[in-house]
Amino acid sequence: MHSAHARRSLRLINDSGAISAASAWLRTLGDSFELGSELTFRLDLCVSELVANIISYAFEDEAPHTLALDLILEPQSVKLVIADDGREFDPLALPDPVAPATLEEASVGGLGVHLVRQFADQVSYERVGARNQLTLAWTRPGRAGPAQGRAPIRRGIERRRRPAAAFPLTASDGARIAADRRSGGERRALGFISRIELFREVPYALIEGLLAHCPQRDYPDEYVVLAPGVPNEHVALVLTGRLRVHLDTPQGGDYSVIAAGECAGELSIIDGEPASAWVVAEPGTRLLLIDAHQFFSELLPLPRVARNLLGMMAARMRKTNQQVIDRVRNSMLLDRLQSEMRTAQEIQTGMLPMRSPLFPEHFEIECEASIQQAREVGGDFFDAFFIDEKRLFVAIGDVCGKGMPAALLMMRTLTTLRSEAGRKQGQKGHLERVMERINRKLALNNDRLLFASLFIGLLDTGSGSFRFANAGHLRPVIARHGEPASLLKVPRNPIAGIDPAIDYALGETRLARGDLLLLYTDGVTEAENEATEQFGEARLLAAVTGAARGSALQTLGAVRDATRAFCGAHAQADDITLLALRFLGQP
């Protein structure tokens, strides 16, 4: 929570740990008092630069010296007071730096105090007794204007009048190297330092000179930064955007991400080997490139940099290991799922009468059936069995959906159909009761509103009488002796499984010797070619007409060949199920 008034103090001695201790202290207070990332960043930068300058210039002898830091929170402002007992040293008296014309003319370091003046709202210096005292002030986040009734603090150089760029860079090798010039957002050219994990808790003064000389590159389009087998000479720090790491191809769907604040290429720099993966910069990515010599000679000798690098590499290794574990686990799960799907297919196929011909002992009919599943398990089904010596029951259907849910509904429908059709009951009203009971049982506890289209028929093999019921299924093809094939006229009824109270209307016809019925699913008529044109009813009727003088098995083959030739290389999208029944009469 915000505190209206608070004061926190820290006392330091002039040793190598003073800078990191002061930086950590301020970041902790920034989080505790909810000062926001921007103000905390400015406080951190200013204290790191000032403490480094005080130790370097104010303490000339080897005697122990102390620094006192006080953070003062008021309702409208935040003040940081830094006092030391060194020689008199007024950093505000330093003249503004002159921006060099080229990168080669730029000096290394020495701009820390000027950045402090740039990143504090107000700065003042005074000599109090034998102590230097610097006071910096900022407006608290979300608070309007300076606090009333407070004496003005001498402001440093007006930030909006400072030079546009302190570190001009030149472009080379065809890639745009951004100077990250200062804008109305009032961010400094090297403001990314606090966001880079590699530089966490590293004093800005220790690395500003090096980073000012490193090029920044923008990638407006997707770009391969590293490729397998290609030598690498830079460590790439991600300033904005992100990098993708692919092990197979630059366009592969399986990849890991290097986000802003992280780096890439450090492993190939360390072991001297070429890159081992594809590293792709996404559009809008900006990278800072540090060459191998600078990385080894100037950055790695800094203890905190080396420690941060080891931490980043360890974290990435753990992340990579977890990804490998996840991939192995997913592969095992996929193998198990595929095994279960194969078992489900075997169970499903085992429920269908797949012999050919279906009833070799019955000379009065020819009956053949086939199913081509688009997946391991599907929703199409067919059935054919005698319910007594002369009456043959046939059925074909298609349940909604694909995959395992459709397969489960298909097996439930098929089991219910066999149970109801095999009940001992009189001939009158048999087919009506079968259809109504199937519909009622499928609709029971059907919260997901699953449904099935279904055609059932009962053929009297003595007389050729064929009674049938249709629940939203496709009309069968009938090929009468000497006539072209046509669609059987059937009553219109809703699909099964939605409304348990439907009364289904029946139809009836009589088959003469040699007449053929073809039952099929929509996988036949809706089969598509590469132009997304459907096979359709006209082509189906033509295929049946052309094979009408052949056997039931030859008719199935003619329809399958016609659909296969029509689809060509286009993948099968739905199950293709056929049942052909030819009436031959009593011998």
Image (cartoon, rainbow, N blue to C red):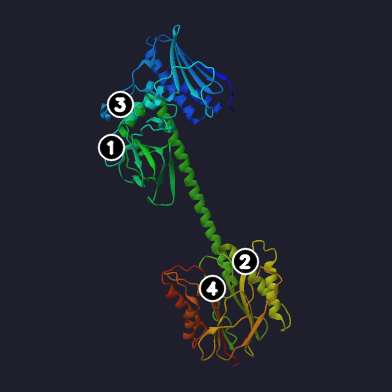
* Marks 3/1: CA–CA distance: 17 Å
Amino acid type, label 2: Leu
Mark found first going from the N terminus, 3 or 4: 3
Mark found first going from the N terminus, 2 or 3: 3
Q: In this orientation, which residue lies closer to the viewer: 18 or 211?
A: 211
Mark 4 element type: helix
Extreme residue in the bottom direction: 587
Circles 2 and 4, Cβ within 8 Å, touching? The answer is: no
Where residue 150 sits in the image (x, y, percent)? 52, 17
Q: Is residue 547 above or below residue 346?
A: below
Where residue 105 sits in the image (x, y, percent)? 26, 26
Q: Which residue is tagged 4?
A: 522
Amino acid type, label 3: Ala
Of labels 3 and 1, the one closer to you = 3
Q: Residue at x 63, y 68 (%)?
A: 451
Q: Quadrant of the N terminus?
A: top right
Of labels 2 and 3, the one closer to you = 3
Q: Which residue is tagged 1?
A: 171
Task: Please indicate, yes or no, whether residue 21 appears anywhere in the rendered image.
Answer: no
Q: Which residue is tagged 2?
A: 409
* Marks 1/2: CA–CA distance: 67 Å
Amino acid type, label 1: Ala
